[in-house]
Image (tube, grey):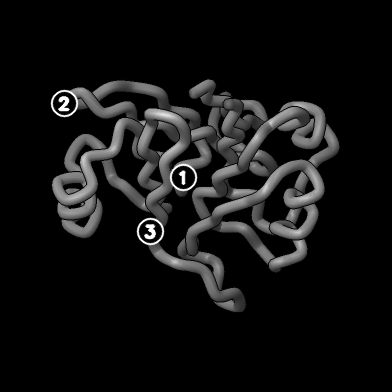
Amino acid sequence: MKIGIISDTHGHVPNAVHDALAGADHILHAGDVGPMEVITELESIAPVSAVLGNTDYSIQLPQTHIQSFVSQKFLVHHIVDLPVPVQLVRVAIADEQPNVVVFGHTHVPYNEHHDGVLFLNPGSASSPRGDSAPSVAIVEC
């Protein structure tokens, strides 16, 4: 099963994202979506689960999303603040025991294990920071 991971679209889904996520079975969006039309556009590729980002003022989404695919449990939350996750995320990790924590906000890709949990930030699909290029991630389950 192929899971597309995206974040920080801020209302824009570049054409390259459609190509990168083609064939995904599901898409997880880690917030700063922009208008709901972004979700609708991504749903033309695969079903989408998304969380609220700190700039998502006009849309209704959960702050945290938990979803399992095959044997992998994903926890999605926009702001994690590594190396010490914010309290809400620490509690959710302790309660849910995910294999993967997906987050965004920094616009910089991140892919590292901490205490046996993969922390994955796909970077920004539309407005990367620093030396990063626009990016998404794919997780095979």
Judged from the image, the secondary structure of the residue bearing numbered disc 3 is strand
Query: Could you say which disc has been placed on residue 104 in the image?
Result: 1
131 w.r.t. 100: above or below: above
100 w.r.t. 56: above or below: above
Q: Earlier in the sequence, mark 3 or mark 1?
A: 3
Instruction: Classify 10 Å Cα crowding around label 3: few (below 14), some (14-19), many (20 and above).
Output: some
**Farthest residue in the right direction?**
15
3 vs 1, front mark = 3
Judged from the image, the secondary structure of the residue bearing numbered disc 2 is loop
Query: Could you say which disc has been placed on residue 115 in the image?
Result: 2
Residue 22 picture quarter: top right
Residue 19 picture quarter: top right
Residue 46 picture quarter: top right
Q: Earlier in the sequence, mark 2 or mark 3?
A: 3
| Quadrant in which the N terminus is drawn | top right
Does the residue at mark 2 contact the one at mark 1 (Cβ under 8 Å)?
A: no
